[in-house]
Amino acid sequence: MKRFRMVYAVMAWLFVVGVAVQVFFAGMAVVARQWPWSNHINLGHALAGPLLIMLVMMYLGKLPGRMKRLTWLLFAIYIVQADVLIFMRAVAPALSALHPVLALADFALGLALARQATAVVRSGVGPLSPQIQPQGSHGD
């Protein structure tokens, strides 16, 4: 169980770093005009990898229910951002402009999950620990 949690934590940190690098790649394409958009696009699609691994590891590692729900939320935000909004430029430009805003949500939620996963790994606590889950909530 501990190694699954460790893999989850590593993937969460990898996702957070990937989002930060994504912002840099966008800056290199838009502001500096030094790199093609393909760098940004390819890394954006590659970030699905760590997220998919996190979705599997959270069950194998028996992470707390709150972390599972937040991981699913992060995945949903990523899908809306990377695979829905960006393709709405022509029909709904204002909605597609939420693409970079959702990157902030990706980063914040990813960072929160990475920190929680690190705390769970370091503590070695089981899935129903009162330190990790609020009183009255149940793991799933």
Image (cartoon, helix red, strand yellow):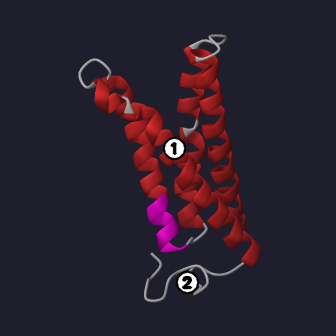
| Badge 2 amino acid | Leu
> Could you tell me residue 135's position as x and y percent?
48, 88
| Badge 1 amino acid | Leu
**In the rendered structure, does residue 37 fall within the stretch colored magenta?**
no
Point out which mark residue 2 bears.
Answer: none
> Could you tell me residue 62's position as x and y percent?
57, 72
The residue shown at (45%, 75%) is: 140
Distance in Å between CA atoms under marks 2 and 1: 30 Å
Quarter occupied by residue 63? bottom right
Tell me if 37 is positioned left or right of 75 in this view. Answer: right
> Could you tell me residue 13's position as x and y percent?
68, 51
Q: Where is the N terminus found, in terms of image quarters? A: bottom right
The residue shown at (64%, 58%) is: 114
Which residue bears the numbered disc 2?
A: 128
Segment tinted magenta in the rendering: 64-70
First of labels 2, 1 by sequence position: 1
Quarter occupied by residue 72? bottom left
Q: Is residue 53 above or below residue 127?
A: above
Tell me if 75 is positioned left or right of 21 in this view. Answer: left
Q: Dot 2, crowdedness within 10 Å: few (<14), some or many (≥20)?
A: some
Label 2: element kind: loop
Name the magenta segment's main secondary structure. Answer: helix
The residue shown at (32%, 21%) is: 89
Point out which mark residue 104 bears.
Answer: 1
Q: Is residue 121 visible?
A: yes
From the viewer's perspective, is the residue at label 2 or at label 1 nearer?
Answer: 1
> Could you tell me residue 39's position as x and y percent?
61, 20
